[in-house]
Image (spheres, rainbow, N blue to C red):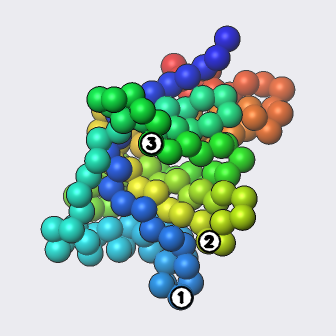
Amino acid sequence: MTNTSQYHVEHLTTFVLDRKEAMINTEDGIRKLRLLDAKGKVWTQDMLLQVEEKTVSLIDPETKNELENFPLGTIMHCQAVMSSCNYDSILALVCKEPGQGKPDLHLFQCDDIKANLIQADIEGAMMDQKGGKVKRRPEALR
């Protein structure tokens, strides 16, 4: 049985985590998002975030085409940032593909299902993939 869950999210922005750009962690990304939002420079894109056994995928809700695919092993950090600005339920994913110099920080607004619940699902999938005897995802999916 495969546990696949889908969440409607809005992609807000993607930043490269780079010390030279003063972009070191999620908090720096949220700070920059606030600045862009204040200038009216955030354009959201609706998509489905799909959590599976081995990957997190971004799917176009209309065409059902896969826009991006993150194997769980490439996800370095997953964090929910609640009530920090106009976007009140942000899911932050830090991903680094093999051979990629600097990690990417992806920020998503989560309205239907809050970011902390999606974070629990992704982290459960990551733990399950690392070989935990007790499967954590079914717990997060309830």
Q: For mark 1, does the 10 Å Cα neighbourhood hold few (<14), some (14 to 19), or many (20 or more) residues?
A: few
On residue 67, the disc is 3
Q: Residue at x 24, y 62 (%)?
A: 42
Residue at (73% x, 38% y) in the render? 127
Q: Earlier in the sequence, mark 2 or mark 3?
A: 3
Give above or below for 108 relative to 39: above
Q: Please state the horizontal and vertical placement of residue 72, each as a whole percent of the image.
A: 67, 43
Q: Which mark is residue 71?
A: none
Q: Amino acid at mark 1?
A: Lys
Disc 1 is placed on an element classified as: helix
**Reading the chain from its start, which is encountered first: label 3 or label 1?**
1
Q: Residues within 10 Å of mark 3 (few under 14, many from 20)?
A: few
Residue at image mark 1: 20
* Residue with the mark numbered 2: 102
Q: Spatial distance from mark 2 to mark 3, Cα to Cα? A: 20 Å
Query: Percent position (x, y) of residue 113?
Result: 37, 33
Q: Quadrant of the N terminus?
A: top right
The residue at 66%/66% (across/down) is: 100
